[in-house]
Image (cartoon, rainbow, N blue to C red):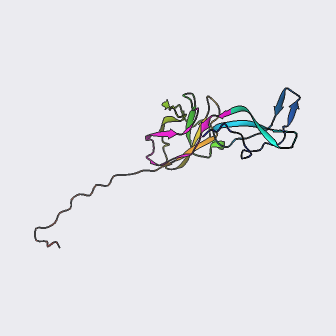
Amino acid sequence: PYSSACSDEGVELGPPSAVSRLVSLIWSQVTVSLAGRYAMCWCDIGVRGECVWQRLALLTVAGPSALTTIHSVAPRAKFSLSIPGVDLALSDQLAVSYVDCANRSSSEPSYSPKQTNPDGGALWELLAPPREGNFSVCWGPRSGQLHTLAGFVRVEETRDCVIGDWEIPATAVCS
């Protein structure tokens, strides 16, 4: 959830890596680990040395906002996967990968969402890999690389067991 309030409870980025006086401030190599909407705030040290917070901007980081797990899907079966997120788009992609998302092969098929939701998430229909195992679900934005982990899926063969040909002889006593 987004909070527009600035306070001492945020993540401190430290001093900027570059300053252009009265024009811009630049922080390099900042990473955000989770999709969301973030208030960008500046602590203006006043005459008394106290921090007076100023809200400068809103930063929106699009992507999955939580990991989703599917516990059992049959090999080659179609399955639906709802991914919660921020500003997920119909041009985004998901793939089911044999390895972790950072090392996935671009030859693995990827899928666009079937629909996006008003809350920012999206619904995908995917095809399970042909072999059993635990797989990563990898997300990528609009024709970008699919290196963000969005969830997990367990692919395993399941069979319905039918018990038949049971017969109780007429002379049997049941208690």
Residue 175 on image: x %, y %: 17, 73
Q: Is residue 6 magenta?
A: no
Q: Is residue 136 visible?
A: no
**Nearer to us in this view, 57 or 7:** 7
User: Which residue is found at the position 14% from the left and 73% from the top?
Assistant: 173
In the rendered structure, the answer to whether residue 156 lies left or right of residue 86 reads left
Give residue 37's quadrant in the image.
top right
Give residue 102's quadrant in the image.
top right
Eyeballing the image, is 62 above or below 164? above
In terms of secondary structure, what is the magenta stretch mainly? strand
User: Which residue is found at the position 82% from the left and 33% from the top?
Assistant: 26
Residue 146 on image: x %, y %: 62, 37
Give residue 10's quadrant in the image.
top right
User: Which residue is found at the position 62% from the left and 46% from the top?
Assistant: 100
**Nearer to us in this view, 156 or 51:** 51
User: Which residue is found at the position 48% from the left and 37% from the top?
Assistant: 126
Range shown magenta: 59-87
